[in-house]
Image (cartoon, rainbow, N blue to C red):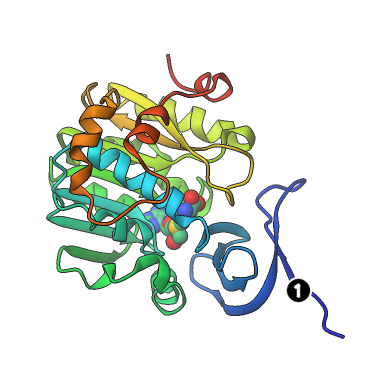
Amino acid sequence: MTTDIWINESLYPDWGQRFLVKRELARVKSAFQDIVIFESFSHGRVMVLDGVIQITEGDEFVYQEMLTHVPLLAHGAAANVLIIGAGDGGVLRRVLQHKSVQRAVMVEIDGEVIGLSKEFLPAISGDAWNDPRAQVIVGDGIDYVRRAADASFDVIIVDSTDPVGVGEVLFTDEFYASSARILSPRGLIVNQCGVPFMQADELRDTSARRKKFFPHVSAYVAAVPTYVGGFMTLGWAAKTDDLETCSADIIRARAGDILGSTGYWTPEIHVSAFHLPPYIARHLPK
Ligand code: SAM
């Protein structure tokens, strides 16, 4: 008799999701975290870091499209993009779909995540790793932004783990101060900011911090099925106020910058994602 094998997410002590495992593909303890990649019956291949679901083949398009297309099309002429974290390569792939992008620098602290993603998650990264515009660096994001040149990027995308462990430094005053310095005059930074139904402090605390260094702080939402608890928020901090309020017509006119189709992002979804339900909006700085 075969026994079913389930993997339970351990993000919350008293609530969570589980996946029936078809087969385990990798289980590695890196210098930074426990990494598991497995084949599920329900969502294709899944990556787990320290017991937290990071990305699944089934719904990664929702998250990666919204974390990437929204800031790049709001900016309108993003040539130099910095990606922090995102070791699965999904954000890099979406950034490189933009014809405006000339340089995409990706700084991921854990080389094991990159190696295992290349081997087991090619459906997420596609051929992004080999794009001549891509520069992939294994290193700590805080060190990179500390050293980067003034006004050297148009958009920064932080696709990190939650603000615990190695990810914590990416939610600090120092990180946001450096990010503001290395962004161009119309630059902006977006970051994964958790599921406010369960992690409201992540949105509240980091938004208050971003407000110290950016005049325009907000958030937008995406419905990512495997980030359990309702809307996932993506933190937004910009130097100018015209980016967040771009009309659907402007965004629609810019959508031709994206090579290829989308499964979640549309100009209407882009604009509506900033209209937050009160239970989320109340955590943003006034
Ligand atoms: N989509 C996921 C989420 O929303 O939680 C994140 C996926 S991605 C795999 C998260 C990546 O951030 C991990 O590979 C982790 O190694 C990386 N990371 C964490 N802290 C970092 C740091 N200080 N500098 C660079 N990368 C970091």
The answer, for residue 44, to whether it is visible in the render is yes
Q: Quadrant of the C terminus?
A: top left
- Residue found at the far bottom of this picture: 1
Q: Looking at the image, which residue sits at the far top?
A: 286
Residue of label 1: 5
Quadrant of the image occupied by residue 243: top left
Q: Who is closer to the viewer here, 125 or 154?
A: 125
Q: How far from the left and from the top, in percent, is residue 104?
A: 21, 57
Question: Would residue 118 appear left or right of 79 to someone viewing this image?
Answer: right
- Residue at the image point whose x is 39% and y is 58% from the top: 86
**Residue at 75%, 73% in the rendered image:** 5
Which residue does the image show at 83% across and 79% down from the upper left?
A: 3
Give the amino acid at mark 1.
Answer: Ile
Query: In the image, residue 212 lies at what x, y percent?
Result: 33, 24
285 versus 93 height, above or below: above
| In front of the other: 34 or 62 | 62
Measured as percent of width and height from the top left, residue 171 is found at 42, 40
On screen, 132 above or below 233?
below
**x 34%, y 56%: residue:** 91
